[in-house]
Structure formats: C-alpha cells, structure tokens
Amino acid sequence: MERNSTLWRNLIDEHPVCTTWKQEAEGAIYHLASILFVVGFMGGSGFFGLLYVFSLLGLGFLCSAVWAWVDVCAADIFSWNFVLFVICFMQFVHIAYQVRSITFAREFQVLYSSLFQPLGISLPVFRTIALSSEVVTLEKEHCYAMQGKTSIDKLSLLVSGRIRVTVDGEFLHYIFPLQFLDSPEWDSLRPTEEGIFQVTLTAETDCRYVSWRRKKLYLLFAQHRYISRLFSVLIGSDIADKLYALNDRVYIGKRYHYDIRLPNFYQMSSPEIRRSPLTQHFRNSRRYCDK
C-alpha cells in the first residue's frame, strides 16, 4: 500500500506542471494524423467497415510515426506508432484477402445484393447459405412440380424468369424473381412429415432458381439458429405477399379470397379429401357470416 501511494504521489503531486505552453503549432503531418484518427473511428461494421477503419487508422499511425521522426525526434514515439501502423496494415491485408476469397456465381451475387444484403446479412453467413444450395435451370414449359405427383423435398427461390401456378388446369398466379417457388408447401409440413404438391408449377420462360434440399436445409437450421430465423422471416413474408395479392387469388364463396395452395383451404374445395377440424370450423363460420 505504501508503494502504491508513493507511485501515486510521484505521478500527481510531484509531476511538473506545464507552466508555459508551446506557442507554435505542430506541423501539418501531426494534424493530418489526428484528422485520419477521427475519420477512421467513424467506420461501420462488417468486412468493408473494417477495411475502412484499418486503412485510415494505419495512415494515421504512419503520419504520427513520420511526425515523431521528423519534428519530435523521439525514438519511442516513432517506434510505437510504426508498430501500430504495421499491425493495421496486416489486419487490412488479412481482411481484404477474406473478402476476395468469398466469390459467388452470378445468380448468388444477384441474390445477395437484392435480398440478403439489405437485411444486413454478412458475406460469411451468406456463404454458408450458398454452399448448401445449388443453381438449377428450368427450360420454358417444363414443370418444376406437378399436382398430386411431385413430392415436397426442397425449397427453391427464383432468380430469373417467371413461373405459372395452376391447379386442375386453372390459373392461380405467377411467381416472379426473388420469390420462393414453394413457400406454402414448405410451411405446411413439419420436418418429419412428407407431402406432395397440390398445384402445378410451369416455367413460362427459361428460368434459373436456387434450390436447397429439405434435409440438408433442416440440418443447416439445426447448426445455425440465426439462419433458421432468417429463413422463417423470408418464407413468412413470401407467403404474406402471395396471400395479399388480390389479383392472384381464387374466389371461394362470397366476399372471400384465399390462397388455394394453403392445405386447409385446398381441402375445402376438394370434397373427396378428409377435412380437418380447422377447415370445418372455418366452413361453419362462413355459413354464419353468409346469413
């Protein structure tokens, strides 16, 4: 305790106080270094934010090292600033190499810049998502899924082209780029359940889509909860867009429009299919409203 009190006394009580201040200002290099420090600490997050921060901080430390060597002539100040400059430079090179090494096909670049980047998804996270998928080409008038035949074993996101959705030969709606092809089917099944498409999806033009296999995607969700929440939001938003597009709906009864691709409502229009309690409750409510 006595030693600590003595050190404190030496630092505070016995340290010489500045009685006269230096009249002339430091050189331009010193002020440039200070400006670079201020601007550098305003950088954001993510890879490009780190590149911004370390580049400006590195230049600031380099200017401080030059100032210490030329104006102050202090070896210790020069040494510290030069070491910090080298550290910032190495960090900049390391991050730049990581950014350059993350490259994608054109479809993934479009997908990231249009859908995932606006949501704040970083490149490493998107790379994990992309590595679990594949890019597939669907030629004009070829079917992605056939009603009552194709099993629901994947989740796909359209990148280019247009898909026509029909049921029993009747047109329902179109699927456009950056929309899921099978979000209602995906959301209608639990991970352990199996099902088949109740609609037919046909390419009206040459299409390209990104597809995730069902089992592989659920494994990815189990490993990365953040990705699971992300897809839950994207799929929910996609289903909501389909439900609220009034021009793309099929009428059931009076004053009601529902997406026939949702399993409960599809069962309502098919008497031969066993109805669930939820469907029966909806039918009773509708009769009451019609009265």
Image (cartoon, helix red, strand yellow):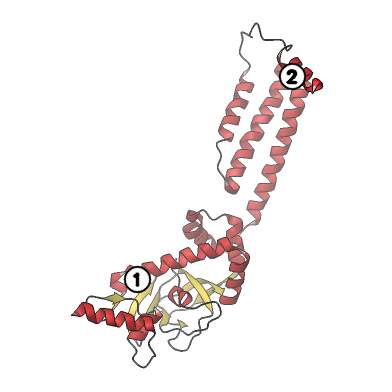
Do the numbered discs 1 and 2 sit on residues whose CB atoms are within 8 Å? Answer: no
Q: CA distance from mark 1 to mark 2?
A: 71 Å
Most distant residue in the right direction: 3
Between residues 46 and 141, which one lies in front from this camera angle?
A: 46
Q: Is 134 left, or right, of 236 in this rendering?
A: right
Q: Quadrant of the image for the C terminus?
A: bottom left
Q: Residues within 10 Å of mark 2 (few under 14, many from 20)?
A: few
- Quick one: which residue is furthest to the left in this view? 291
Q: Find residue 8 and name its label.
A: 2
Left or right: where 168 falls relative to 255: right
- Where is residue 254 drawn, in percent x and y? 22, 79
Relative to 86, residue 125 above or below: below
Seen as rendered, the residue at the extreme top is 20
Residue pictured at 63% horizontal, 66% vertical: 223
Between 92 and 45, which is closer to the camera in this rendering? 45
Question: Residue at left 60%, top 26%?
Answer: 34
Residue 205 rendering spot, x and y as whole percentages: 42, 75
**With 44 as the anchor, is 72 left or right in this view?**
right
Label 1 secondary element: helix
Give the quarter of the image for residue 281: bottom left
Q: Disc 1 marks which residue?
A: 243
Is 288 on the left-hand or right-hand side of 93?
left
Q: Nearer the viewer, residue 48 or 192?
A: 192
Tag in front: 1 or 2: 2
**Could you tell me residue 267's position as x and y percent?**
37, 85
Relative vertical location of residue 4 with respect to residue 205 in this rendering, above or below: above
Q: Residue at x 69, y 45 (%)?
A: 93
Residue 226, above or below 190: above
